[in-house]
Amino acid sequence: MRHVEMLINKFDYSCNDGFLVTSCSVKIRLGVTLMNGDTTFTKPYGLTESRRVAAAPVKEYNEKWMNGVLDRLWEYIFSDPELRGYLGV
């Protein structure tokens, strides 16, 4: 039986403090464990990104940016040769 476990070890989103917001950043750290019968694959993954902003970010802009960050993280994870080797792809 196959089993997948993903733990979110860190998810930090922040913008600089002060009168004028000029930058935001996100830091994500995950632990991925795949189990297939008696074999187990475990590996940490993460991503850190920053962006400059001209004004305090609005909801729609934040959603688009965060979706892009998560897309890049999934792409990074699922293109990992070790993980792909374990999955046999």
Image (cartoon, rainbow, N blue to C red):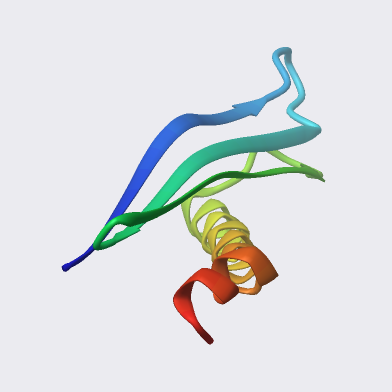
Residue 74, by quadrant, is bottom right
Residue 2 locus on image (x, y percent): 23, 67
Identity of the residue drawn at 46% across and 76% down: 87
Identity of the residue drawn at 81% across and 32% down: 22
Residue 49 locus on image (x, y percent): 74, 44
Out of 6 and 16, give the one closest to the viewer: 6
Out of 21 and 81, give the one closest to the viewer: 81
Out of 64 and 26, give the one closest to the viewer: 26
Lateral position of residue 43 relative to residue 2, left or right: right
Residue 39 locus on image (x, y percent): 37, 57
Answer above or below: position of 72 versus 85: above
Residue 84, by quadrant, is bottom right
Residue 76 locus on image (x, y percent): 66, 65
Answer above or below: position of 31 versus 41: above
Regarding residue 89, the answer to whether it shows in the image is yes
How many marks overall? 0
Residue 80, by quadrant, is bottom right
Lateral position of residue 4 relative to residue 21, left or right: left
